[in-house]
Image (tube, helix red, strand yellow):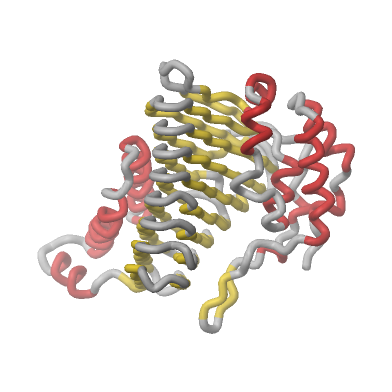
Amino acid sequence: MSTQVHANLTEKQVREISDRLGEPEWLLETRLDALAALDDLPFPDVIHTPGRKWTDLADLDFASFVDPLTAAEEKDLVAPETEGVEVLPFAEAVDEHEALLREHFGSVVDPETNYLTALSTALFSTGTVVYVPRGVTAENVKIRTTMNSRSLFNYTLIVTEESASVTILERQDSGEEAVEGDRYYSGLVEVVAGENAYVQYGSLQDLSEETYNYQLKRGTTDTYGTVNFIDCNIGSRLTKTSVEVALDGDASETKIVGAFFGHEDQHFDVDARVWHNAEHTTADLVTRGVVDDHARSVYEGVQHVGREAWDTNSYQRENTLMLSDESEADASPKLIINNHDTEASHAATVGQVDAEDLFYMTSRGVHERLAKNMLVEGFFVPVLEEIAVDELREDMQSRIRDRLRARTK
C-alpha cells in the first residue's frame, strides 16, 4: 500500500475546516471519529474478473495531491420558487437546519463505509442540502460545483418528506485556474425519500482529465417511495463511482441509469447496487458505455434480494462498446437471491462496432469514421431515452457528439 494521506493529516486541520463552516460539536466529533477510523478501514472493494484485478485505489499516492486546507470551488445553486423548499450551501444549512442535519447526516452513507468515505467525511469543505417538505413538488433544482484546487471534498444531502417530489441536476467540472499535476475529487451523496416521496437525481461528471474521481451516491426509500439515479461520466483521469439504493419500504422502487464515454487513457469503474429489503419492491438498472483509444472500463451490478423481500422485481442490463483494439472493457453482473418469490434478470455485453452494420453504411458511401460515429450515437440512444431530466440528457448527448467530432480530426 502506498503512503496514505492521513499520515500528513492532523486533528488541527480537521478542526480548522469545521470551524470555518461554523459546525456544532456533534458534527466536529463525527469528523474526528472518521479521522480516527482511517487506520482500520479498507479501501473500496476491488472488482475481480477472469484474469484481471480492477481499480485498486490503495495503490494511489493520495498524500501527493490531497491538501485539505487549500480547497477552492465555485458553487452555483438554482432553487425553485416553491414555498418551503430549501436549497442551501452546507454552511447555511448548519445554521438554519441543524436538527435536520443531525438526524440525516451519515444515516444513508456510513462515514466509515471505507477509507475514502471516512476521508471525505473528515475533510469535506463544501456541500449542498436540499430539503423538500411534506406534499411539496420541487422541479429544476440545479447544483454546479466547479473545482478550482488540487483537491476537493464535496457532500450533498437530499431529504424529502412524505408525498414530496424533487428533480435535481448536479454537475461537477473543473475551472480554468491553472493547477499543475494530479488532482482529486471526492463526492458523497445521501438521498432520503420519505413515504410516497419521489426523488430524481441526475449527475454529470466532466472533471479535467488530470483528476482522480471517487463518488458514492446512496439512497434509501420508505413505503411507496422512489429514488431514481442518473449517473453520467465523461471527464476525469480515473473514476470510481458507485450508485446504490436500499429499498427499505414496502412497494418502493428505483431506476439507476448510467452512461460513460472514455477516450485516450481514461479509466471508468462503474458500480450499481440495489438491496431489496422489503416486499413488492422494483428495481431497474441500465448502463451503457463506450471506450476508445487506450481507455478502460469495468462495470459491476449487484441485485441483492433479502429474505423478507417477497414479490420482488429486479432487472439489470449493461452494454459496453469498444471503438479501438487497444481499449479494454469488462462487466460483472451479480444476482444474490434469498427469497424465491422473485422475478429477476441480469445481462451484460462487451463488444466492438457490428461489422455488418459498418459494412452496410460504408458500402453506401459513408466514410468509415463517420459511420462509426453514427453507430455510437445510435448505441447511446436506449440509455439516453431512459434519462428523465431533459437538460441532463441534452448535455450528455452534446458531450458525446463533441467527443465523436474530435475523433474525426
Seen as rendered, the residue at the extreme bottom is 51
Q: Residue at x 48, y 19 (%)?
A: 84
State the image coordinates of residue 352 (x, y, percent, origin top left). Answer: 33, 72
Would you place residue 372 above or below residue 93 in this image? below
Tell me if I can see residue 104 in this picture. Answer: yes
Nearer-the-camera pick, 172 or 48: 48
Would you place residue 287 above or below residue 82 in this image? below
Q: Quadrant of residue 372?
A: bottom left
Q: Quadrant of residue 81?
A: top left
Nearer-the-camera pick, 41 or 235: 41
Seen as rendered, the residue at the extreme left is 364
State the image coordinates of residue 136 (x, y, percent, origin top left). Answer: 40, 25
Tell me if I can see residue 302 in this picture. Answer: no
Q: Quadrant of residue 347?
A: bottom left
Q: Residue at x 67, y 40 (%)?
A: 152
Count of marks placed on residues = 0
Nearer-the-camera pick, 72 or 87: 87
Would you place residue 336 above or below residue 177 in this image? below
Q: Residue at x 74, y 41 (%)?
A: 123
State the image coordinates of residue 357 (x, y, percent, origin top left). Answer: 18, 69
In the image: residue 5, left or right of residue 270: right
In the image: residue 266, left or right of residue 165: right
In the image: residue 346, left or right of residue 6: left
* Placement of the N terminus among the 4 image quadrants: bottom right
Nearer-the-camera pick, 307 or 155: 307
State the image coordinates of residue 230 (x, y, percent, origin top left). Answer: 41, 47
